[in-house]
Amino acid sequence: MDSIPNPLEATSVSGTYGHLLTYHRKCQYASRLAAEAHAGQTMKGSKLPYFVHCSGVAATVSSTFQCQDAEVVAAAFLHDVLEKTRMTAKKLESLMGRRVMALVQMLTKPSRGNPKDYWERLREAGWEARLIKMADALDHLAEPSNKLPARIVTGHKTLALAFGKEREIQLAREVLSAALDNAVMSVVQESGDDRVHQTGANLTR
Protein backbone atom coordinates (compact mmCIF):
# COMPACT_ATOMS: atom_id res chain seq x y z
CA MET A 1 0.00 0.00 0.00
CA ASP A 2 3.04 2.29 0.16
CA SER A 3 2.75 3.44 -3.46
CA ILE A 4 -0.73 4.89 -2.96
CA PRO A 5 -1.25 7.57 -0.29
CA ASN A 6 -3.92 6.86 2.26
CA PRO A 7 -6.77 9.24 1.31
CA LEU A 8 -7.35 9.97 4.99
CA GLU A 9 -3.81 11.29 5.26
CA ALA A 10 -3.41 12.91 1.84
CA THR A 11 -2.99 16.67 1.66
CA SER A 12 -6.26 18.31 0.63
CA VAL A 13 -6.54 20.05 -2.73
CA SER A 14 -9.25 22.63 -3.22
CA GLY A 15 -11.60 23.01 -6.16
CA THR A 16 -13.04 20.55 -8.68
CA TYR A 17 -9.65 19.00 -9.34
CA GLY A 18 -9.20 18.39 -5.65
CA HIS A 19 -12.58 16.62 -5.48
CA LEU A 20 -11.69 14.35 -8.40
CA LEU A 21 -8.26 13.64 -6.98
CA THR A 22 -9.72 12.67 -3.62
CA TYR A 23 -12.34 10.49 -5.35
CA HIS A 24 -9.75 8.58 -7.36
CA ARG A 25 -7.38 8.28 -4.40
CA LYS A 26 -10.07 6.76 -2.22
CA CYS A 27 -11.24 4.35 -4.90
CA GLN A 28 -7.72 3.33 -5.87
CA TYR A 29 -6.71 2.85 -2.24
CA ALA A 30 -9.82 0.76 -1.53
CA SER A 31 -9.17 -1.31 -4.64
CA ARG A 32 -5.60 -2.07 -3.58
CA LEU A 33 -6.71 -2.83 -0.03
CA ALA A 34 -9.38 -5.26 -1.25
CA ALA A 35 -6.94 -6.97 -3.63
CA GLU A 36 -4.44 -7.50 -0.81
CA ALA A 37 -7.05 -8.64 1.70
CA HIS A 38 -8.50 -11.21 -0.71
CA ALA A 39 -5.12 -12.34 -2.07
CA GLY A 40 -5.09 -16.08 -2.71
CA GLN A 41 -8.88 -16.39 -2.62
CA THR A 42 -10.85 -17.53 -5.66
CA MET A 43 -14.50 -17.46 -6.64
CA LYS A 44 -16.31 -20.57 -5.45
CA GLY A 45 -16.08 -23.28 -8.12
CA SER A 46 -13.75 -21.15 -10.23
CA LYS A 47 -10.09 -20.27 -10.61
CA LEU A 48 -10.89 -16.58 -10.93
CA PRO A 49 -9.39 -14.39 -8.18
CA TYR A 50 -12.04 -13.28 -5.71
CA PHE A 51 -11.03 -9.69 -6.34
CA VAL A 52 -12.70 -9.98 -9.77
CA HIS A 53 -16.02 -9.98 -7.92
CA CYS A 54 -15.00 -7.06 -5.69
CA SER A 55 -14.01 -4.93 -8.67
CA GLY A 56 -17.18 -5.95 -10.51
CA VAL A 57 -19.37 -4.76 -7.66
CA ALA A 58 -17.50 -1.46 -7.44
CA ALA A 59 -17.74 -0.93 -11.21
CA THR A 60 -21.46 -1.61 -11.09
CA VAL A 61 -21.97 0.92 -8.30
CA SER A 62 -19.94 3.65 -10.01
CA SER A 63 -20.71 3.07 -13.69
CA THR A 64 -23.93 1.08 -14.07
CA PHE A 65 -25.71 2.63 -11.09
CA GLN A 66 -23.94 5.98 -11.60
CA CYS A 67 -23.03 6.59 -7.96
CA GLN A 68 -20.16 9.06 -7.70
CA ASP A 69 -19.78 8.97 -3.92
CA ALA A 70 -16.18 7.85 -3.39
CA GLU A 71 -16.90 6.29 -0.01
CA VAL A 72 -19.76 4.20 -1.39
CA VAL A 73 -17.57 2.97 -4.24
CA ALA A 74 -14.78 2.24 -1.75
CA ALA A 75 -17.18 0.23 0.40
CA ALA A 76 -18.24 -1.69 -2.71
CA PHE A 77 -14.63 -2.75 -3.31
CA LEU A 78 -14.36 -3.77 0.35
CA HIS A 79 -17.84 -5.18 0.93
CA ASP A 80 -16.60 -8.71 1.75
CA VAL A 81 -13.40 -8.03 3.67
CA LEU A 82 -14.93 -8.36 7.14
CA GLU A 83 -16.81 -11.52 6.18
CA LYS A 84 -14.17 -13.35 4.15
CA THR A 85 -10.76 -12.09 5.29
CA ARG A 86 -8.89 -11.38 8.52
CA MET A 87 -9.57 -7.67 8.25
CA THR A 88 -11.13 -6.25 11.41
CA ALA A 89 -13.60 -3.41 11.67
CA LYS A 90 -11.12 -1.42 13.73
CA LYS A 91 -8.39 -1.80 11.11
CA LEU A 92 -10.77 -0.99 8.28
CA GLU A 93 -11.92 2.17 10.04
CA SER A 94 -8.32 3.27 10.56
CA LEU A 95 -7.59 2.79 6.86
CA MET A 96 -10.80 4.02 5.22
CA GLY A 97 -12.77 5.94 7.83
CA ARG A 98 -15.88 5.35 9.90
CA ARG A 99 -18.46 5.65 7.10
CA VAL A 100 -16.81 3.07 4.83
CA MET A 101 -16.38 0.72 7.78
CA ALA A 102 -20.05 1.14 8.77
CA LEU A 103 -21.23 0.37 5.23
CA VAL A 104 -19.10 -2.76 5.07
CA GLN A 105 -20.34 -3.86 8.50
CA MET A 106 -23.92 -3.43 7.33
CA LEU A 107 -23.25 -5.72 4.36
CA THR A 108 -21.44 -8.39 6.39
CA LYS A 109 -23.41 -11.56 7.05
CA PRO A 110 -23.12 -12.78 10.63
CA SER A 111 -21.49 -16.17 11.08
CA ARG A 112 -24.34 -17.16 13.38
CA GLY A 113 -27.96 -16.23 13.81
CA ASN A 114 -31.07 -16.16 11.67
CA PRO A 115 -30.45 -15.14 8.02
CA LYS A 116 -33.77 -13.27 8.13
CA ASP A 117 -32.22 -10.86 10.59
CA TYR A 118 -29.56 -9.99 8.01
CA TRP A 119 -32.16 -9.10 5.39
CA GLU A 120 -34.23 -7.16 7.90
CA ARG A 121 -31.13 -5.19 8.84
CA LEU A 122 -30.53 -4.36 5.19
CA ARG A 123 -34.12 -3.19 4.78
CA GLU A 124 -33.52 -0.71 7.57
CA ALA A 125 -30.16 0.40 6.13
CA GLY A 126 -29.51 3.60 4.22
CA TRP A 127 -29.77 3.59 0.46
CA GLU A 128 -25.98 3.42 0.04
CA ALA A 129 -25.67 -0.03 1.66
CA ARG A 130 -28.71 -1.28 -0.24
CA LEU A 131 -27.22 -0.02 -3.50
CA ILE A 132 -24.01 -2.00 -2.90
CA LYS A 133 -26.04 -5.12 -2.10
CA MET A 134 -27.91 -4.71 -5.39
CA ALA A 135 -24.61 -4.42 -7.24
CA ASP A 136 -23.43 -7.56 -5.45
CA ALA A 137 -26.53 -9.47 -6.56
CA LEU A 138 -26.19 -8.21 -10.13
CA ASP A 139 -22.55 -9.26 -10.35
CA HIS A 140 -23.39 -12.76 -9.08
CA LEU A 141 -25.87 -13.22 -11.94
CA ALA A 142 -22.85 -13.43 -14.26
CA GLU A 143 -21.75 -16.68 -12.63
CA PRO A 144 -22.06 -20.12 -14.34
CA SER A 145 -25.58 -21.30 -15.15
CA ASN A 146 -25.53 -24.09 -12.56
CA LYS A 147 -25.41 -21.41 -9.86
CA LEU A 148 -28.13 -19.22 -11.34
CA PRO A 149 -31.20 -20.64 -9.53
CA ALA A 150 -29.72 -19.82 -6.12
CA ARG A 151 -28.47 -16.45 -7.34
CA ILE A 152 -31.92 -15.63 -8.70
CA VAL A 153 -33.46 -16.30 -5.30
CA THR A 154 -30.99 -13.95 -3.65
CA GLY A 155 -31.41 -11.44 -6.46
CA HIS A 156 -35.14 -11.15 -5.86
CA LYS A 157 -34.62 -10.77 -2.12
CA THR A 158 -32.22 -7.96 -2.96
CA LEU A 159 -34.64 -6.36 -5.41
CA ALA A 160 -37.02 -5.91 -2.50
CA LEU A 161 -34.44 -3.50 -1.07
CA ALA A 162 -34.81 -1.18 -4.08
CA PHE A 163 -37.07 1.40 -2.49
CA GLY A 164 -36.51 5.11 -2.25
CA LYS A 165 -36.43 8.14 -4.50
CA GLU A 166 -32.65 8.26 -4.98
CA ARG A 167 -31.69 8.29 -8.65
CA GLU A 168 -29.12 5.59 -8.10
CA ILE A 169 -31.63 3.26 -6.42
CA GLN A 170 -34.19 3.77 -9.15
CA LEU A 171 -31.61 2.97 -11.81
CA ALA A 172 -30.38 -0.06 -9.87
CA ARG A 173 -33.94 -1.38 -9.56
CA GLU A 174 -34.46 -1.12 -13.31
CA VAL A 175 -31.15 -2.81 -14.18
CA LEU A 176 -31.39 -5.61 -11.60
CA SER A 177 -35.01 -6.36 -12.48
CA ALA A 178 -34.14 -6.76 -16.17
CA ALA A 179 -31.11 -8.90 -15.33
CA LEU A 180 -33.23 -11.20 -13.16
CA ASP A 181 -35.79 -11.61 -15.95
CA ASN A 182 -33.00 -12.59 -18.32
CA ALA A 183 -31.52 -15.00 -15.78
CA VAL A 184 -34.87 -16.75 -15.27
CA MET A 185 -35.30 -17.12 -19.03
CA SER A 186 -31.78 -18.53 -19.28
CA VAL A 187 -32.57 -21.18 -16.67
CA VAL A 188 -35.86 -22.01 -18.39
CA GLN A 189 -34.24 -22.35 -21.82
CA GLU A 190 -31.36 -24.45 -20.54
CA SER A 191 -33.62 -26.79 -18.60
CA GLY A 192 -35.95 -27.31 -21.55
CA ASP A 193 -38.70 -27.98 -19.04
CA ASP A 194 -41.91 -25.98 -19.45
CA ARG A 195 -42.71 -26.66 -15.81
CA VAL A 196 -39.74 -24.48 -14.87
CA HIS A 197 -41.28 -21.64 -16.85
CA GLN A 198 -44.72 -22.24 -15.33
CA THR A 199 -43.28 -22.23 -11.83
CA GLY A 200 -40.57 -19.66 -12.47
CA ALA A 201 -41.93 -17.60 -9.61
CA ASN A 202 -40.59 -20.27 -7.29
CA LEU A 203 -37.10 -19.09 -8.17
CA THR A 204 -37.89 -15.79 -6.54
CA ARG A 205 -38.83 -17.26 -3.16
Image: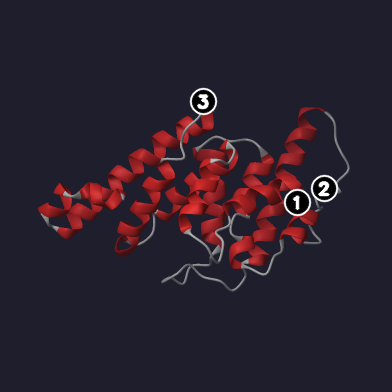
Callout in the foreground (2, 3): 3
Q: Which residue type carries mark 2?
A: Leu
User: Which residue appears at 21% of the width and 49% of the height?
Assistant: 200
Alpha carbons under labels 1 and 3: distance apart: 28 Å
Extreme top residue here? 165
Q: Amino acid at mark 3?
A: Lys
Give yes or no for contact between labels 2 and 1 (Cβ–Cβ under 8 Å): yes
Disc 3 target residue: 165
- Name the residue furthest right: 11
Nearer the observer: mark 1 or 3; the answer is 3
| Coloration of the structure image | secondary structure
Is residue 181 depicted above or below 81 in this figure?
above
Residue 142 vertical placement versus 99 (above, below): below
- The residue sitting at 40% across, 34% down in the picture is 174
Question: What residue would you read off at disc 2?
Answer: 8
Per the model, the C-alpha gap separating discs 2 and 3 is: 31 Å
Helix, strand or loop for disc 1: helix
Closer to the camera, 125 or 171? Answer: 125
Of callouts 2 and 3, the N-terminal one? 2
Q: Residue at x 72, y 44 (%)?
A: 99
Q: Secondary structure at mark 3?
A: loop
User: For the point 51% across and 25% down, which residue is it?
Assistant: 165
Residue behind mark 1: 96
Whole-percent x, y for residue 125 in the image:
58, 41
